[in-house]
Every structure is written in structure tokens, then in C-alpha cells.
Amino acid sequence: MENRLKSHNDKKIIGTKQNQFGILLMLIASIFFSLMAPIIKNLNHLPLMELIFFRNLPTVLILPWIIKIKDISIFGKNKLFLLLRSLFGFITMIGFVFTFMKMNLTDAMAIRQLSPFIIIYLSIVFLHEKFYSNQVFIFIFAFIGSLLVIKPGFRSEMFPAIFGLISVFFSALAHTVLRRLRLTDYPVVIVNHFAFFSSVISLIILMIQNKFQLPNGNEFLLLLSLGLISFFAQMTLSYAYRFTPASVVSLYLYSRVLFTAILDFIFFSELPDPLSIMGCFLITIGGFIHFRNRVKIERQEGEK
């Protein structure tokens, strides 16, 4: 009996340590994602597709070696869904880079945090997942929060915000496809397909536009940093989900808004206005309700 209790306690301690490690990795990933924002803004004079190309270049060069070492097929199994994930992800990336080039960084990151709420909607509509009454409040908080951040009106800043919302919708589509892909393909294969697709398409568009600008020394270092930070952000995010359940660790993605606000102030002396702060708060509250709801559902399912 004592041995059973000891074994149970050991598993509990190991599980707790894994959760803590996963949370730490998620916070590190959030810092990496936040660091990308000021780099993109510093390079906003360069063509959009050039930024996207260099953002994916290190991943394209590094991941195939990792896949080869792991002795995994680089082509993947579910090729149609890999293509869809890459296409939706590429459109998302265009919006991600464009909004950080044109908007206040904190506002742009806050809009990006709306993706989980759209995923809930898409999961209910297309995956026929159960709708819970608490989700009404989630959508209300997210909707009001987004209005406070975007501040609808006829002004030049509206276009990047609208484009950001469109990219968030495609981000939700990409994550919905990922739910299916995780059953058939390894994360490194999925990320490699996405990076290769994005780098090739962005390079083709850049050549058609004939807008490539040869970066100087400082710009090249920033572009290289952007690509490396993106690679480490993707890898730490993947391992965070590997060590810790998504229902536990996903809440910490909202720390990106705080980290981005700090970096925005340090590098550009910009602070979000009171309405944006309130909007970020409501979006985060909606995310917290979603987090608590998922934990409760998983606990109930585990007890059955």
C-alpha cells in the first residue's frame, strides 16, 4: 500500500514539474514572439515579402537536418491538409507582419490574441464540438475588447486593423486544420512544410514585384535575428505543448500582449491608449474564461 502511494506521489511530482517546465517554455516562446514585433517595425521600410522570406529562411535550413536525424519522412502523410495548413498559415503571416509594420505593436498583438475565440466558433460549426453557455461570455468579451482596440471609424489606421482581423480568421483556420494534422504528422514536418511553402511563395512574389532591396549590415543582422527568433519561438511553443496539456499552458500565450507593450515602450516610447488597455484586458478575461472552461471539461471527461 505504501509503495502504491509513493508511486502515485512520484507521478504527481513528475507531472507537476513537467507542467512547470511547459509553462516556462510557453513564457519563453511568448518573449520570442514579442521580440519579433519591434524587429519587424524597425524593418518596415523593406518589402513585406522580403521580411516573410527571411523570417522563414533559418527554419528551412535547420529543420530538414532535424527531420533527417529523427529518421522521419520529410514529405509527411496527410499532404492535402499540410498544403491547407501552409496556405492558411502563409496568409496569416502576411497579416502578422503587415500589422506590426503599420500599427501600434500592442494593438497589433492584442488583435492577434483573438484567434482562440474564432477557433472556438469554427470548432462548433465545422467540427460539431459541443457549445457551452460560458462561451457566450467569451465571445462578448472578445467582441467588445476588439472594438476597443480597433476603434472602428473612417481613418487610415483602420486598414491594417481590418487586415489583421482577416489574418486572425485564417490563423484560426490553420489551427483547426492542425487539430487534424496532429493525428497523422509530426510537428517538425508540419512546421517544415509551412516554412518551405512560405519562403518559396514569398520569394516568387518578391521576384514578380521586382522589389528586393539588398539589406545593409545592420538590416541583414536584424533579418537574420528575425528568422532565428521565429525558429526558436516555434520550437519552444511546440515543446511547451508536448510537456504540458494545452488546457494548462495556452493561457500563458496572453503574456505576449504584456511583453509586447513593454518592448513597444522601450524601443519606440509608445504606450497603448486607455481604450486599448481596456480592450486588451477584456480579451484576456475572455481567454481566461475559455481556459477555465477547458480545464473543467477535461476534468469531467477524465472522471467518466
Image (cartoon, grey):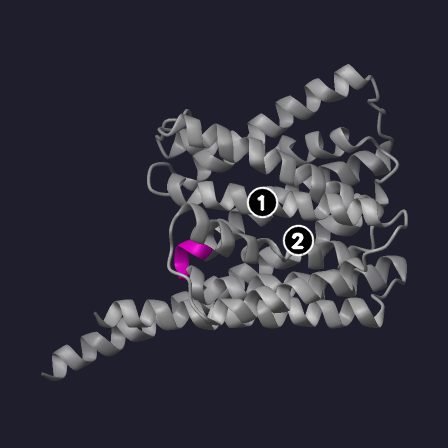
For the residue pair 240 and 253, the one nearer the viewer reads as 253
Q: Secondary structure at mark 2?
A: helix
Describe residue 221's horizontal placement relative to residue 289 as left or right.
right
Disc 1/disc 2 C-alpha distance (Å): 9 Å
Vertical order, 228 against 206 (above or below)? below
Decide whether the magenta segment is chiefly helix, strand or loop: helix
Magenta stretch containing residue 244, yes or no? Answer: yes
* Quarter of the rendering containing residue 78: top left
Q: Residue furthest left?
A: 1
Which residue is depicted at the point 33% across and 42% down?
183
Q: Is residue 221 visible?
A: yes
* Quarter of the rendering containing residue 129: bottom left
Range shown magenta: 241-245
In the picture of the structure, the residue carrying the numbered disc 2 is 112
Q: Earlier in the sequence, mark 1 or mark 2?
A: 2
* Cβ–Cβ under 8 Å for marks 1 and 2: yes
Q: Amino acid at mark 2?
A: Arg
Q: Amino acid at mark 1?
A: Ser
Percent x, y of residue 175: 50, 46
Q: Secondary structure at mark 1?
A: helix
Describe residue 82's horizontal placement relative to residue 212 as left or right.
left
Vertical order, 189 against 287 (above or below)? above
Percent x, y of residue 47: 82, 30
Describe residue 245's horizontal placement relative to residue 148 as left or right.
left
Percent x, y of residue 236: 53, 52
Q: Which mark is residue 171?
A: 1
Which residue is depicted at the point 90% across and 50% down?
155
